[in-house]
Amino acid sequence: MPDVLTLAREIGFEGCAAFDAAALEFRREVREMCAADRCKRYNKCWACPPACGSVEAMAARARRFSRGALVQTVARLDGDFDAEGLAEAQRLHKRRFETLARQAKILTGGACLPMGAGSCTRCVRCTYPSRPCRYPERVHPSMEAYGLLVADVCALAGLKYYYGPGTISYTSCILIN
Ligand code: SF4
């Protein structure tokens, strides 16, 4: 049976590496950055703070797992203002991660915790806060929503966070036992 990293390589992620989930640091300051709302998604989506739960509650969910698989989509951009290139790389990463999360759940019998990149964009308009999430089983709050600094987790896994000028990378992970 393949493992999560083998699945990730087959799906096409440019970066794939294991890390020790026991070494993760769940930081309140990361959640404070979410609250600064630079991405304009704070308090607008079930997958994002504050709706996703407190950093303590999120950390408790994550601490049930001992290992992690970090995955990255790394793309080359056409200049500094390649908005379409950025959007395309983000779509590709979300598609790949959706596939990986689905396969990892099958592989582990549901005993895994996928953490996405960025806010949930599955629905054109999120139902938050007036109605329940349409797809609660398929929503994967971001690493930042768990209070993780993505650059730190990359360092833990031995992967780069930044691949140099003219590139963009998107990073997600799946915790397992
Ligand atoms: S699946 Fe839809 S309703 Fe649920 S968090 Fe994502 S955008 Fe919102």
Image (cartoon, grey):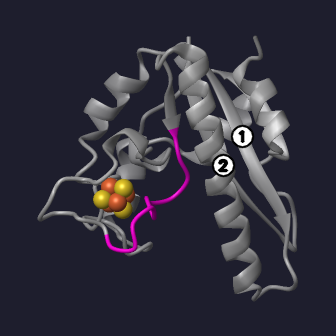
Whether the residues at callouts 2 and 1 have beta carbons within 8 Å, the answer is: yes
| Vertical placement of residue 3 versus 128, above or below | above
Numbered tag placed on residue 71 in the rendering: 1
Asked whether mark 1 lies closer than 8 Å to ligand 1, one says: no
Q: x, y (%) of residue 176? A: 56, 18
Q: x, y (%) of residue 165? A: 87, 71
Q: Label 1 amino acid?
A: Val
Query: Looking at the image, which is closer to me, 27 or 12?
Result: 12
Q: Residue at x 77, y 85 (%)?
A: 82
| Vertical placement of residue 166 versus 101, above or below | below
Query: Looking at the image, which is closer to me, 63 or 25?
Result: 63
Mark 1: which secondary structure? strand
Does residue 48 appear in the picture of this structure? no
Quadrant of the rendering where the N terminus is positioned: top right
Magenta region, main secondary structure: loop
Q: Tell which quarter ligand 1 is in.
A: bottom left
Region rendered in magenta = 115-125
**Mark 2 to mark 1: distance in Å?**
6 Å
